[in-house]
Image (cartoon, helix red, strand yellow):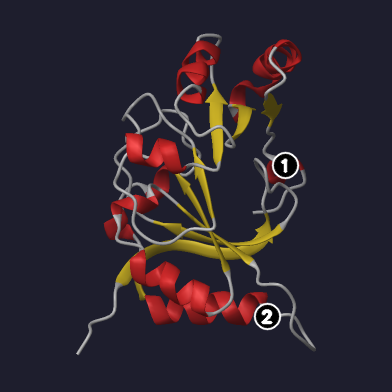
Amino acid sequence: MKQTVHLPVMEHFYTLQGEGYHQGKAAYFIRLGGCDVGCVWCDVKESWDASKHPLLSVQQIIHEAVSTTSPPGGEREGAIVVVTGGEPLMHNLGELTTELLQAGLKTHLETSGAYPLSGVWDWICLSPKKFKASLPEIISLAHELKIVVYNKTDFEWAEKYAAQVSPGCKLFLQPEWDKAAEMTPLIVEYIKAHPEWELSLQLHKYIHVP
């Protein structure tokens, strides 16, 4: 008999996607515990230790996602479910994505790309970090490249990744939240000179939603 997978879930909630290509769309977030990438500016450091978060079965996770996103009074196009972290690819996500897709939901992944890919994804947002390199297999599959700009040298670093992604990959530069006042004007000028890039802002923090 197949034993179901349990995953450490720090939190799960229905809100708007605040960043990147799908900004402003309704999205159900599943934030998994566990991360060893160690970004100094991470705003969810409480997610790093997986042992601090309850283990939920895939069935429990799916039930919450479906019941929360189901529209009243009828069917509509499947909701976006964003699996994030922490670093979600520290876990095997095959069963989770299979069940999400069977439930008619869209699977979106937010990852640093530091671990091998598992699961089946409608959308992969790669946000590489300097602290632990992204794997080539993830880079080539990314639909969206989102670079967090913390200082001026990050533009050159962003271009190194832009040269590795597929031609259709969407390119975003996002100011690190605590340095947004300093970095956003620099990003604006960079995008004007390099229009293949777009600006990503953490909309959810401006409108005060999760």
Residue 80: give x, y in percent of width and height. 62, 63
The residue indicated by pointer 2 is: 70
State left or right for residue 12 relative to residue 113: right
Residue 38: x percent and y percent? 34, 34
The residue shown at (54%, 28%) is: 147
Question: Element at badge 2?
Answer: loop
Q: Decide: is 138 above or below 117.
A: above
Determine the image quadrant of residue 5: bottom left
Front position in the image: 83 or 36: 83
Q: CA distance from mark 1 to mark 2?
A: 24 Å
Most foreground residue, 128 or 119: 119
Of the numbered discs 1 and 2, the one sitting upstream in the chain is 2
Q: Nearer the viewer, mark 1 or mark 2?
A: 2
Image: 109 above or below 131 = below
Position of residue 35 in the picture relative to residue 156 (left or right): left
Q: Amino acid at mark 1?
A: Leu
Report the residue at 22% width, 85% height from top: 2
- Counting from the top left corner in percent of width and height, residue 68 is at 63, 77
The residue indicated by pointer 1 is: 203
**Label 1 neighbour load within 10 Å: few <14, some 14-19, many 20+:** some
